[in-house]
Image (tube, rainbow, N blue to C red):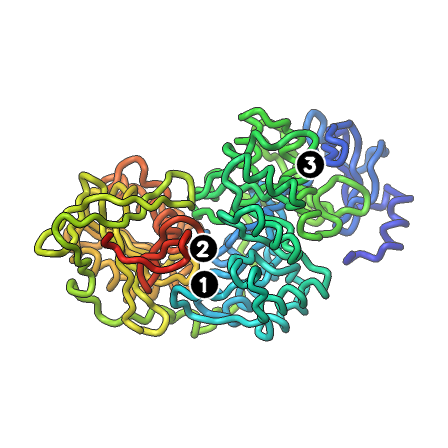
Amino acid sequence: MKAMISDLIKKAQNIKEVDLVLKNGEIVDVYSLETYKGDVAIYNGYIVGIGSFEWSEKAIDVSNQYILPGLIDGHIHIESTMVRPSEFSRAIIKHGITTVVTDPHEIANVSGIEGIKFMINDAKNSVVDILMKLPSSVPATKFENNGATLTSNDLRELLEYDEVIGLAEVMDYPAVINCEQDMMEKIKMVKNKKLVIDGHAAGLSDDKLDIYSIASIRNDHEAVNANEALTRVRKGFQVLVREGSAAKDLLAILPAITLKNSTRFSFCTDDKHLDEMVNEGTINHAIKIAVNNGLDPLIAIQMATINNAKCHGIENKGAVAPGYLADLLIVDNLIDLTIHKVIKSGKIVNFEGQPVKEQAEIPKTIMNSVKTPKITEEMLRIPLEEGQKANIIEILPGKLITLKRVDFVDIKEGVFQSNPEKDYLKMAVCERHRSTGNIGLGIVHGLKLKCGAIASTVAHDSHNIVVAGTNDKDMILAIEALHNTQGGLVIVENSRILAQVELPIAGLMSNQPYEVIVNKLLYMHEILETIVGHHSQNIFMILSFLCLPVIPELKLTDKGLFDVTLFKHISVGV
């Protein structure tokens, strides 16, 4: 505890000398799943008393309102919000999220240790507590090119940082199953520190889940339905129920959550775009969805607070109880969670005018990460014979999982032709870290792009340039635009750039205030409505996950089309 225990004990015996008292509130008890009326006394950032105390000038009347713990996000990639940690904090605090557990593996895949240190340093002065898990799998697989490789020796020094609380999602499950030396060393050194190891068990069979658990990997955010969630609970896993921009698994998992097993479930975001986050929040939004679909509000709040704290070994957070950090929310009711006050470390947050605190200097090396040679139309050709079927990536709405579709496509002079009416579009992933010239080509169904092209340097997890379009000229212009701005999102139509969001920090994040980026994203969505339609809201998030070769079934990397089930590259033509 930052405060001296003896000092807190003294104040608990003399409530008149505390910093703040919340009077007559309805306290949410996440342990007993009940509420009860009481006063909460706060001193030096901690709760030092709960009971009935005399009125004083330091008291605030919260009659007819609920006092609940500040919300904890069990797993999020801040880079996916497209703003740096200090700006992320300003944007999220108004929604009652007071602590997040983040995995900086997005920037690690581009900029390595230097990128991780930037994230830690920039988070230091944030009003939200930003706790880090060290990226376990950089690169995520051997089937693509990224910007860095992190070994156990590289990560070891970072374990000494106070902000580091464990090892992040172990997505390289073959390394675990095959007991590869460096992965075993990463697990060992984190276990020796008594820190937590996160899982990434997308599509794993029961026997492979057993091996994950034996390796001390005891939580997972990749369950996509109730059956997968219950299987994980029965094997001793904490299930992090994900509700983000691209992956929306909450409603599918909800039937698995009961009063008997609720402590084995937590909420997480994983990835969410900034405009959505600013508008609706993250974990608070998940609570609302769950409650509106029948979950007991007290269980939902438990999942968003103490369950996450226990899952990640976070002490003194997640409950309204003596000795706990005074991260608290004052709300009208437990259904819509309308927030009246956010109290962080015992102080009321002015979240409407949250000032920009001191920000870390951005290393020049991570501001110059897009290195691509000139791309030509010939380099984007997908050769196919007349009458030949093709392997196609099929998008499932609201899921990171894709399907492997096999179908006839349009072919002209031995080359694939995009067909917007059938929603069969060309997709390319261009290596952008070392200017190798590698380009993986594929066909995608489900983007619903009617004309033009979209491209991004946010392409999980190696973050090469990903582009999809109805014609090669627009695709090439989109690639060139990203090279010129050193990263971001772009929309092109008829050889014109219609909208762009510049993300020069590792090609992943902006160096501007979050309010500026929100406005640019909103404008981009207006443009998308004209070339995609009403399904456009998360099209860039969807596009970014079509490159992740650790989630079934079919993905695209800079080395080509990748069949996750077979765990090897395959040809486009069948």
Q: Quadrant of residue 342?
A: top right
Q: Quadrant of the N terminus?
A: bottom right
Inspect the image, locate mark 1, and give the three-letter code of the amino acid beneath it: Thr
Residue drawn 57% across and 61% down? 176
Can residue 164 be spotted in the picture? Answer: yes
The residue labelled by disc 3 is 68
The residue labelled by disc 2 is 550
Q: Secondary structure at mark 3?
A: strand
Left or right? Give the position of 72 relative to 366.
right
Residue drawn 21% across and 48% down? 389
Q: Earlier in the sequence, mark 3 or mark 2?
A: 3
Q: Secondary structure at mark 2?
A: loop
Residue 141's label in the rendered image is 1
Left or right? Give the position of 534 relative to 515.
left
Residue drawn 30% across and 44% down? 405
- The total number of labels drawn is 3
Q: Quadrant of residue 42?
A: top right
Q: How far separated are the C-alphas under marks 3 and 1?
A: 41 Å
Q: Position of residue 422 (x, y in %)?
A: 20, 39
Nearest the viewer among 352 and 464 is 464
Q: Secondary structure at mark 1?
A: loop
Nearest the viewer among 482 and 18 is 482
Inspect the image, locate mark 2, and give the three-letter code of the amino acid beneath it: Val
Marks 3 and 1 close (CB-CB < 8 Å)? no
Inspect the image, locate mark 3, and give the three-letter code of the amino acid beneath it: Leu
Marks 1 and 2 close (CB-CB < 8 Å)? yes
Q: How far separated are the C-alphas under marks 1 and 2?
A: 8 Å
Can residue 85 be spotted in the picture? Answer: no
Residue drawn 64% across and 60% down? 166
Q: Position of residue 279 (x, y in %)?
A: 46, 39
Q: Position of residue 61 (x, y in %)?
A: 73, 31
Give above or below for 505 relative to 14: below
